[in-house]
Image: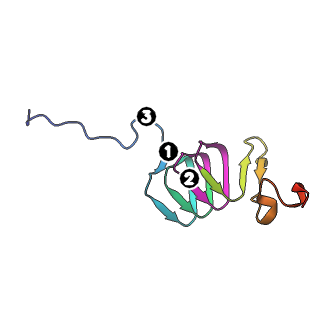
Amino acid sequence: MFGKKKPAPTAEPTGDKSSVFVSGTLVLGNVYSESGLVVQGGIKGDVFGNRVTVKPQGWIQGTLTCRELVIERGGVVDGDIKVIDDKTDQPRTSVEKKTGPEALPFNEASQGA
């Protein structure tokens, strides 16, 4: 019972080389990842990654640039989003953050005020 050693846990149990920012983690600054990036905590800064997944409790405040993006329900990206095409290295999808009245789903002008 006590004589047998259990194998040490590996950092990559599934073979995936993703960096994971767990819930309760706050990163202040830019983040660069050549492989996958899983955001369960918060990042305040620009994010550059190959594959980025924002989990339900995760958030990014800054510009997000990546090749693949998944934002799960509840996950938040507060900033511009650029998804780059592998073949052209140009933005395939680009969403700019809106501020002010334009950011609201409706405004007074559309309500006939």
Q: Earlier in the sequence, mark 2 or mark 1?
A: 1
Instruction: Please indicate whether residue 92 sits to the left or right of residue 75 in the image.
Output: right
In the rendering, which numbered label is found on residue 33? Answer: 2
**Cα distance, mark 3 to mark 1?**
10 Å
Q: What residue appears at the point 75 percent right and 43 percent down from the top-left corner?
A: 85
What is the x, y in percent for residue 40? 49, 50
* Residue designated by label 1: 18
Q: What residue appears at the point 8 percent right and 32 percent down from the top-left corner?
A: 1
Q: Name the image colouring.
A: rainbow
**Cα distance, mark 2 to mark 1?**
8 Å
Q: Residue furthest front?
A: 113
What is the x, y in percent for residue 24? 43, 57
How many neighbours does mark 1 have within 10 angstroms: few (below 14), some (14-19), or many (20 or more)? some
84 shown above or below 25:
above
Label 2 sits on a secondary structure element that is: strand
Q: Are marks 2 and 1 in contact (CB under 8 Å)?
A: yes
Q: Amino acid at mark 1?
A: Ser
Q: Amino acid at mark 2?
A: Ser
Residue 101 falls inside the magenta stretch = no
Instruction: Please indicate whether residue 50 sits to the left or right of residue 91 in the image.
Output: left
How many neighbours does mark 2 have within 10 angstroms: few (below 14), some (14-19), or many (20 or more)? some
On the image, which quarter does residue 59 sit in? Answer: bottom right
